[in-house]
């Protein structure tokens, strides 16, 4: 693991600026209505905490944990719900916060889960990154920060084998 080999894709400033823009859109959309922000662990932890600090409506945070990677750089193609205990979200505004939408399997799993279990007032899906080129489902995020190419990215919550989540920027390496 050599941080010096990473190339920076989005700097801390670029990420924070984009988060401000996204939060302004959300503040307009929700017009002060209460929101349940659901952070998808572990990858979305940095993004979710920075995003909610910029939201101005009454807000509750929930955390769920899913996994689809086995420690490498490719998805297993199967989403595992490690911990998905949630309060009653009937008639609530739900904002799901993810780090990256890649194949879209995780997003689809979560949206299906919401539909099957709750009649929410609204369900919106927000992802910091959108790797549109890899999509195998029809799911699209309602909000996303940046569209990205088909590179394996790390930093700001995104990991390779558990490492790099603590970086303030998002980067990639030619080889991990
Ligand atoms: P999807 O189900 O294929 O859309 O993948 C979603 C999950 O895969 C994300 O929440 C990440 O945990 C992981 N993932 C996808 N692409 C990357 C990447 O470039 N770096 C790190 N994790 C990734």
Image (cartoon, helix red, strand yellow):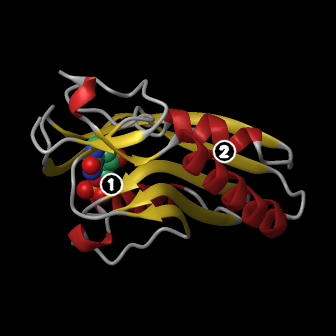
The response on whether ligand 1 sits within 8 Å of label 1 is yes
Q: Name the residue carrying label 1.
A: 106
The residue lying at 67 percent from left, 60 percent from top is 22
The N terminus - image quarter: top left
Q: As drawn, which residue projects farthest toward the bottom?
A: 138
Residue 134, image x and y in percent?
Answer: 22, 68
Residue 135 screen position, x and y as percent? 25, 71
Mark 2, Cα crowd under 10 Å, few <14 / some 14-19 / many 20+, is: many
> Which comes before the other along the chain, label 2 or label 1?
2
The dot on residue 51 is 2
As measured in the structure, the alpha-carbon distance from the residue carrying label 2 to the one carrying label 1 is: 20 Å
Q: Residue at x 53, y 61 (%)?
A: 125
Residue 152 in the image: x percent, y percent?
22, 48
Q: Is residue 46 shown left or right of residue 152? A: right
Q: Is residue 47 above or below residue 140?
A: above
| Residue under the point 74% across and 62% down | 26
């Amino acid at each position: 693991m050599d941080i010096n080999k990473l190339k920076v894709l989005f700097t801390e400033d670029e990420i924070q600026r984009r988060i401000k823009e996204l939060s302004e859109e959300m503040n307009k959309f929700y017009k002060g209505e209460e929101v349940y922000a659901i952070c998808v662990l572990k990858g979305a932890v940095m993004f979710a905490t920075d995003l909610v600090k910029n939201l101005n409506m009454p807000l509750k945070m929930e955390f769920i944990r899913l996994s689809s990677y086995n420690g490498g750089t490719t998805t297993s193609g199967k989403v595992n719900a490690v911990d998905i205990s949630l309060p009653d979200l009937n008639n609530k505004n739900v904002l799901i916060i993810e780090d990256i939408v890649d194949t879209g399997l995780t997003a689809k799993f979560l949206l299906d889960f919401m539909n099957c279990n709750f009649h929410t007032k609204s369900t919106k899906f927000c992802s910091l990154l959108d790797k549109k080129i890899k999509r195998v489902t029809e799911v699209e995020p309602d909000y996303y920060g940046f569209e990205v190419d088909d590179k394996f990215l790390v930093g700001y919550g995104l990991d390779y084998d558990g490492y790099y989540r603590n970086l303030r920027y998002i980067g990639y390496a030619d080889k991990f």
